[in-house]
Image (cartoon, rainbow, N blue to C red):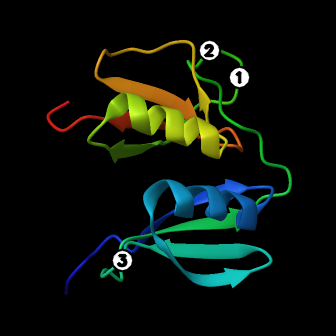
Amino acid sequence: MATTLGGFVLGTPDPQALADFYRALLGWQEVEREPEWVRLKAPGQERPGLSFQLESDHTPPMWPQRPGTQQMQAHLDVQVDDLEAETERACALGATLQEYQPQRDVRVLCDPHGHPFCLFLPGA
């Protein structure tokens, strides 16, 4: 029996809009689009994928996390070759650069629906 990670799912109040953001950010292909579900995959790969599921009562996590607020359960790490250029591009696509940055060679941003993700350089 083989076990493989099939994908990662982000809850969002607007699956299509968030999928469009990540498709532009990652350059991935859309393979499924329904009103409550969208799935992306990397070109030339079937799995793992990145999916977006409707959660109409979604509460974005707080970064950095604080007691009494919605905690970050997971985040995406995206490797880039040019940290500054990709940070600017992500912001132009709708991401928000976070004030607190824990490392010099990593940038913490939030996607348009508030999910934290990190851009990082190889070796970071």
The mark found on residue 69 in the picture is 1
The Cα atoms of the two marked residues, 2 and 1, are separated by 6 Å
Contact check, label 2 and label 1, Cβ < 8 Å: yes
- The residue that appears at 39% across and 14% down in the rendered structure is 102
Looking at the image, residue 17 sits to the left or right of residue 111; the answer is right
Instruction: Name the disc covering residue 43, or none.
Output: 3
Tell me the SS state at disc 2: loop
Residue indicated by mark 2: 66
Looking at the picture, does residue 105 appear above or below residue 100? below
| Residue 79 location, quadrant | top left
Alpha-carbon span between mark 2 and mark 3: 37 Å
Q: Nearer the viewer, residue 70 or 64?
A: 64
- Can residue 116 be seen by looking at this rendering? no
Total count of labels: 3
Which label's residue is closer to the chain start, 2 or 3?
A: 3
In the foreground, 95 or 89:
89
Mark 1 is on which residue type?
Thr
- Give the mark nearer the N terminus: 1 vs 3: 3
